[in-house]
Amino acid sequence: MRKLNLENYTVKVRQPDPMKLGEMIDAEMPYNFKDSILNLLFYKDLELDGFELVRQNILATKIETCKASEVLLEEDEYQRVKRAVAVFKGFNRHDVELVTRVNEAAEIEVEPVKEK
């Protein structure tokens, strides 16, 4: 299994100063990690067929409804997230943390539940 950190992070941006016309200021904005992953899962260049679309939606729902700061992904789920990141073109500097988290998601050992 893989553990993926879903917490938002902060990115630095330059934006127009609302108080001084024509001036730029540095600002920090939240980067919504979970929404970004959800959007990547349905990127059109993945060319999902009907079956894959349903499986992708199950994964998206798992991520979307996760209340914890991290989600545990089965290896096939992790590979689908990783593929979405690999297929997408157009990342920018703000996405470096997202790509790094996906590519470096920690592999963890999970002990099977023993039935009584």
Image (cartoon, helix red, strand yellow):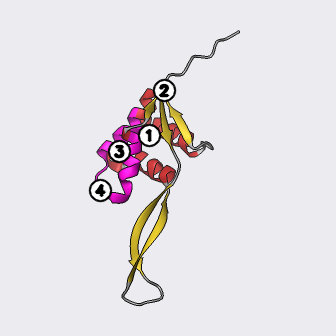
Q: Circle 2 sits in a helix, a strand or a loop, which is it? A: loop
For label 2, the crowd category at 10 Å Cα-Cα, with few meaning under 14, some 14 to 19 and many 20 or more, is: few
Task: Report x, y in % for residue 1.
Answer: 48, 27
Q: Which residue is mark 2?
A: 108
For marks 3 and 1, the one nearer the N-term is: 1
Give the alpha-carbon distance from disc 4 to disc 2, as whole Å: 31 Å
Amino acid type at circle 1 is: Leu
Q: Circle 1 sits in a helix, a strand or a loop, which is it? A: helix
Give the alpha-carbon distance from disc 4 to disc 1, as whole Å: 22 Å
Q: Which residue is mark 3?
A: 85
Q: Is residue 48 visible?
A: no
Of residue 4 and residue 58, the one placed in the foreground of this image is: 4
3 vs 1, front mark: 3
Give the alpha-carbon distance from disc 1 to disc 2, as whole Å: 27 Å
For label 1, the crowd category at 10 Å Cα-Cα, with few meaning under 14, some 14 to 19 and many 20 or more, is: some
For label 4, the crowd category at 10 Å Cα-Cα, with few meaning under 14, some 14 to 19 and many 20 or more, is: few
The residue shown at (40%, 76%) is: 15
The residue shown at (47%, 35%) is: 55
For marks 4 and 3, the one nearer the N-term is: 3
Q: Find the magenta span and give its range.
A: 79-102
In the drawing, what numbered circle is on residue 53? 1
In the drawing, what numbered circle is on residue 90? 4
Q: Are marks 4 and 3 in contact (CB under 8 Å)?
A: no
Amino acid type at circle 4 is: Gly
